[in-house]
Image (tube, rainbow, N blue to C red):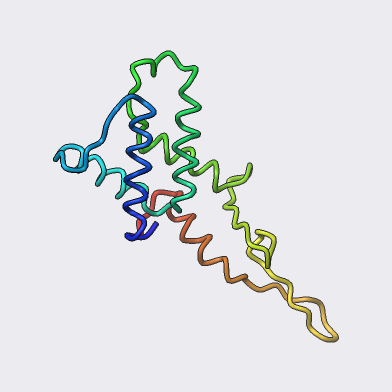
Amino acid sequence: MNFNEKPQFVEELKKMARQVSQKINEENDSDALLIKGYWENLNEFPLDVIKKAIQNAIRSRDDDPAYYFRAMITVPEIRVEARKLLTDDTGRVKSGCEKCSGSTWILMKVKGASPIAHRCECWLEVQRTLRGIKGGKK
């Protein structure tokens, strides 16, 4: 996410809080720190992934009696769900690219020779996402 998406991110946190019978008020100092903590630990993921990850984390809690007290979804819970959304069963990052069909490789035809594989443009984005998944910072 970039800084311009932070207001949408905050709205998602507020929505999440309401779903677990909590409330976030940006003007409250402790809530402002809470928002800052979530932002700093999740901003390397795309906003749409965070939205889905929050919903998946809430759904995964629904049948767990330990969460009947309705605590906020934690950063680690969201990160686990975001990783699931961004990786396949082998742990490789999904790119969703139409040019390379998600492999990050494109075969270039060479006249009179075998095709040569080269990196697709989406590879850099995949690497940035992968660093985020492994806990690295930008």
User: Going 49% across and 55% down the picture, which residue do you hit?
Assistant: 130
- The residue at the far top in this view is 65
Determine whether 114 is above or below 74 in the image.
below
Residue 120 horizontal/vertical position (percent)? 62, 70
User: Going 16% across and 37% down the picture, which residue do you hit?
Assistant: 30
- The residue at the far left in this view is 29
Figure label count = 0
- The residue at the far right in this view is 112
**Which quadrant holds the N terminus?**
bottom left
Q: Quadrant of residue 24?
A: top left
User: Going 21% across and 38% down the picture, which residue do you hit?
Assistant: 31
**Which quadrant holds the C terminus?**
bottom left
**Nearer the observer, 13 or 123:** 13
Determine whether 36 is above or below 24 in the image.
below
Residue 53 horizontal/vertical position (percent)? 47, 40
Residue 119 horizontal/vertical position (percent)? 62, 71
Q: Is residue 115 left or right of residue 129?
A: right
Q: Is residue 51 left or right of residue 14?
A: right
Residue 14 horizontal/vertical position (percent)? 32, 38
Q: Is residue 9 left or right of residue 93?
A: left
Determine whether 12 is above or below 129 in the image.
above
User: Going 81% across and 77% down the picture, which residue do you hit?
Assistant: 114
**Nearer the observer, 57 or 114:** 57
